Image (cartoon, helix red, strand yellow):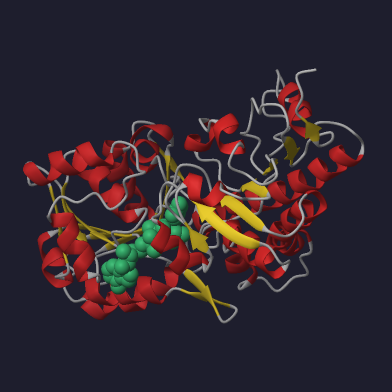
């Protein structure tokens, strides 16, 4: 018989996760507090057009009635035996803010039944899942005996969530007790082609998720510094990285430098960790500081090669091929350019000009409009579309043909361009002679 599942939080991760579960034969009721979002989803609108495979899955799931969205949380809980929470955990006023997860736990407690399984997929501060027990026990049921509690972190990336969940990664599973973990293992064993990996405790799995983010943050900070060192020494960091990766089988994983770290995961995971630590930790708080300062490094680079005037920023999103701008370094780059006296314009194929104006407070427009009369183009997000730019045509519209490439995606510039690449041995004056 099909498993009845409720999924709480139909955002960037929860929506594709809910559909991925429906693709594995679950009957999924997706719950969100945003009524408009729910209505649009039920009308068949794909709210995440950048998510690969989501459109087809949405159409199939809605027509087969294996997925529907609702704001009626209590009915969703009553009708399901497995409840998955994917609402955001934030960092507010220097504290982990798990209020959305707690609110959902309270809601679930109102309809919790004997034998139900509650799974937290939101990235929690260590100890956070265990602290939900009293809220869920408001149901009158005993955790680990009458109902079961597991923490199984989302390890998917925006843009490829469906395939990440279904086929790319094994699921990390942890439980309040052995039976909780076994039940979660049985559930994800049916969903994830790569199977499941059991963690010893809820806290171990919570730490694993945060440590992965901290590792990325520290390594991006390191890559940014090493790429600056490479430039100072007249060495191309990107080429060095390419040859280093040949045959080292993961011994070293030199990360890519960039304009900073965005999204609402990696920038907040070190902070979530620090909320529960009492010891003296220097490296990952410093990496956070360095990554926060990286957009200003980009602004300084632009200032070295362009005089004030119009600056065209390519990319509002925090990384390539996604529509997600939370903590995007583009916001700080744009603000920094304006502060330095540039008139910033931004083009991002995933956002309308009006959205860019509202979100970033600078002018938005088409690529042509943004580039016309620009003294410099700054490539901040690595969208594939930017790799197909006809630079000869665009260059004819610019006032000065200077490109600052923070993602190493600009190639084939015609004569007359100055290419300033983060991590390059030196700026490149393009000339065929
Ligand atoms: N975005 C990523 O790439 C990513 C990757 C890995 C893990 N995660 C983790 O997944 C979790 C969710 O992240 P996201 O990016 O999907 O967040 P999001 O902000 O995109 O979406 C959250 C959704 O939850 C809904 N919501 C809020 N409170 C609710 C409630 N009480 N009941 C029902 N719905 C509610 C919101 O309306 C929204 O639609 C976070 O803990 C995050 O750390 C995210």
Q: Residue at x 26, y 80 (%)?
A: 138
Confirm whether residue 326 shows in the render. Answer: no
Residue 301 image offset from top left, x and y in percent: 78, 51
Q: Residue at x 77, y 59 (%)?
A: 283
Q: Residue at x 32, y 50 (%)?
A: 48
Considering every residue shown, the one lying at the far right of the view is: 233
Q: Is residue 324 left or right of residue 346?
A: left
Q: Residue 54 falls in which quadrant of the image? A: top left
In the image, 333 versus 309, the foreground residue is 309
Residue 385 image offset from top left, x and y in percent: 47, 36
Q: Quadrant of ligand 1?
A: bottom left
Residue 426 image offset from top left, x and y in percent: 84, 35
Question: 432 above or below 210?
Answer: above
Residue 99 image offset from top left, x and y in percent: 40, 77
In the image, 27 versus 2, the foreground residue is 27
Q: Is residue 189 left or right of residue 220?
A: left
In the image, 134 versus 308, the foreground residue is 308
Question: 156 above or below 361?
Answer: above
Q: Residue at x 71, y 52 (%)?
A: 218
Confirm whether residue 244 shows in the render. Answer: yes
């Amino acid at each position: 018989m099909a498993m009845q599942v409720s999924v709480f939080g139909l955002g960037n991760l929860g929506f594709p996760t809910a559909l991925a579960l429906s693709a594995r034969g679950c009957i999924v009721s997706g719950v969100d507090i945003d009524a408009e979002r729910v209505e649009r989803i039920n009308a068949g609108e794909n709210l995440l057009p950048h998510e690969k495979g989501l459109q087809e899955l949405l159409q199939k799931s809605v027509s087969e009635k294996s997925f529907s969205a609702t704001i009626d949380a209590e009915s969703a809980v009553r009708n399901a035996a497995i409840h998955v929470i994917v609402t955001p955990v934030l960092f507010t006023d220097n504290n982990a803010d798990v209020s959305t997860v707690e609110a959902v736990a309270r809601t679930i407690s109102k309809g919790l039944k004997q034998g139900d399984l509650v799974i937290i997929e939101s990235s929690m501060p260590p100890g956070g899942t265990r602290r939900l027990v009293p809220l869920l026990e408001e149901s009158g049921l005993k955790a680990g005996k009458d109902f079961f509690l597991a923490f199984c972190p989302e390890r998917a990336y925006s843009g490829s969530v469906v395939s990440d969940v279904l086929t790319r990664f094994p699921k990390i599973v942890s439980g309040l007790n052995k039976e909780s973990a076994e039940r979660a293992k049985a559930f994800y064993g049916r969903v994830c082609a790569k199977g499941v990996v059991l963690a010893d405790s809820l806290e171990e799995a919570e730490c694993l998720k945060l440590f992965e983010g901290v590792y990325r943050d520290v390594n991006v900070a390191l890559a940014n510094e090493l790429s600056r060192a490479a430039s100072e020494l007249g060495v191309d960091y990107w080429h060095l990285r390419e040859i280093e990766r040949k045959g080292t089988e993961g011994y070293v994983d030199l990360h890519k430098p960039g304009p900073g770290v965005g999204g609402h995961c990696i920038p907040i995971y070190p902070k979530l960790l620090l909320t529960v630590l009492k010891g003296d930790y220097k490296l990952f708080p410093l990496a956070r500081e360095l990554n926060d300062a990286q957009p200003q490094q980009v602004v300084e680079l632009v200032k070295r090669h362009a005089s004030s005037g119009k600056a065209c920023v390519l990319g509002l999103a925090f990384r390539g091929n996604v529509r997600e701008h939370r903590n995007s370094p583009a916001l700080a780059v744009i603000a920094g350019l304006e502060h330095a006296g540039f008139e910033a314009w931004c083009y991002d194929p995933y956002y309308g000009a009006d959205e860019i104006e509202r979100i970033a407070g600078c002018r938005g427009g088409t690529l042509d409009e943004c580039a016309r009369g620009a003294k410099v183009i700054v490539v901040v997000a690595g969208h594939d579309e930017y790799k197909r730019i006809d630079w000869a045509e665009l260059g004819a519209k610019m006032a000065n043909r200077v490109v600052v490439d923070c993602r190493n995606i600009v190639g084939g510039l015609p004569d007359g361009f100055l290419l300033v690449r983060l991590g390059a041995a030196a700026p490149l004056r393009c000339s065929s002679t």
